[in-house]
Image (cartoon, rainbow, N blue to C red):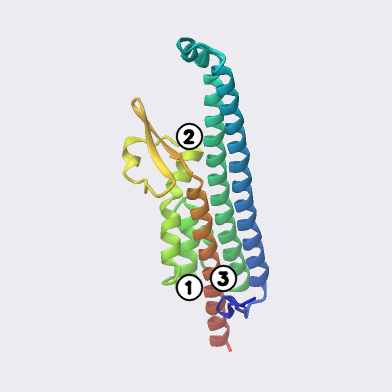
């Protein structure tokens, strides 16, 4: 087995090892949850289609449409709604997890260093942005290497907010703020629109970006912490 030594790193700040482990376990748990949910629902869809095929074959072709609408249409709608709600729920959960990890890092910094400004002192109602600003402006973290991971994640925060507060249905003024990426679509229902996670690749990609960001974040925090401690000698 070949070992990629470029992926091996050490922390000067020992506590970061524990945070890194929690990050890794959390990300892997969400990947497993997503995979299990998708596999389970695909099995349900397959069983449903098999049942429909068997029943339709028993009927004359002229009677199939009416029979389907009366007997099976509601079940089909329920399956689609389960899928929508599952993906909505995991999207909310992974953003909550991600912000929680940033909160823990900021709390560790606050407890270790005597900066006058705290996270709660920063303006804004969006926690994700406040954590980012605290680390960049107060802790003076070099965010150059983090920006490429952070921005795509923050660009999707509106999706999480629409799911949490508006059942995925944006107001007209919000539509242009939605960054459509792979696995995400905007469907029209009469006069309304709704964001739909139409492929789990959307969740998988978010988790991957969060994983990369958190790894680089801890390395950057460790470097900055060492700088501060060396200056204080």
Whether residue 118 can be seen here? no
Residue 75 coordinates in the image, percent (x, y): 57, 23
In this picture, is 183 found above or below 1? above
Whether residue 34 can be seen here? yes
The front one of 164 and 121 is 164
Residue 144 occupies which quadrant of the picture? bottom left
The residue indicated by pointer 1 is 141
Residue 106 marker? none
Mark 1 or mark 2: which is in front?
2
The residue indicated by pointer 3 is 218
Q: CA distance from mark 1 to mark 3?
A: 11 Å
Q: Is residue 136 left or right of residue 43?
A: left
The front one of 184 and 132 is 184
The front one of 22 and 32 is 32
Residue 114 coordinates in the image, percent (x, y): 58, 73
- Residue at the image position 44 percent from the left and 53 percent from the top: 124
The residue indicated by pointer 2 is 167
- Residue at the image position 59 percent from the left and 59 percent from the top: 101
In this picture, is 185 found above or below 105? above
The front one of 194 and 160 is 194
For the residue labelled by badge 1, is the local secondary structure a helix, a strand or a loop?
Answer: loop
Q: Earlier in the sequence, mark 2 or mark 3?
A: 2
Mark 1: give few (<14), some (14-19) or many (20+) Cα within 10 Å. Answer: many
In this picture, is 34 found above or below 189? below
Q: Earlier in the sequence, mark 1 or mark 2?
A: 1
Residue 58 coordinates in the image, percent (x, y): 57, 14
Residue 6 occupies which quadrant of the picture? bottom right
């Amino acid at each position: 087995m070949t070992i990629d030594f470029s992926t091996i790193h050490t922390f000067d700040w020992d506590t970061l090892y524990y945070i890194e482990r929690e990050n890794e376990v959390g990300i892997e748990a969400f990947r497993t949850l997503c995979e299990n949910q998708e596999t389970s629902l695909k099995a349900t869809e397959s069983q449903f289609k098999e049942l429909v095929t068997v029943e339709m074959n028993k009927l004359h072709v002229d009677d199939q449409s009416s029979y389907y609408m009366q007997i099976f249409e509601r079940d089909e709608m329920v399956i689609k709604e389960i899928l929508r709600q599952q993906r909505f729920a995991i999207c909310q959960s992974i953003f909550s997890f991600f912000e929680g990890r940033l909160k823990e890092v900021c709390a560790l910094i606050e407890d270790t260093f005597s900066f006058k400004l705290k996270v709660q002192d920063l303006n804004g109602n969006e926690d994700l942005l406040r954590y980012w600003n605290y680390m960049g402006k107060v802790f003076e973290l070099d965010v150059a290497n983090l920006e490429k991971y952070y921005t795509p994640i923050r660009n999707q925060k509106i999706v999480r907010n629409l799911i949490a507060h508006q059942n995925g249905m944006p107001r007209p003024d919000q539509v242009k703020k939605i960054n459509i990426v792979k696995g995400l679509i905007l469907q029209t229902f009469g006069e309304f629109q709704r964001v739909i996670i139409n492929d789990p690749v959307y969740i998988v990609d978010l988790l991957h970006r969060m994983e990369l960001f958190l790894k680089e974040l801890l390395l950057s925090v460790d470097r900055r912490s060492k700088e501060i401690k060396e200056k204080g000698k």
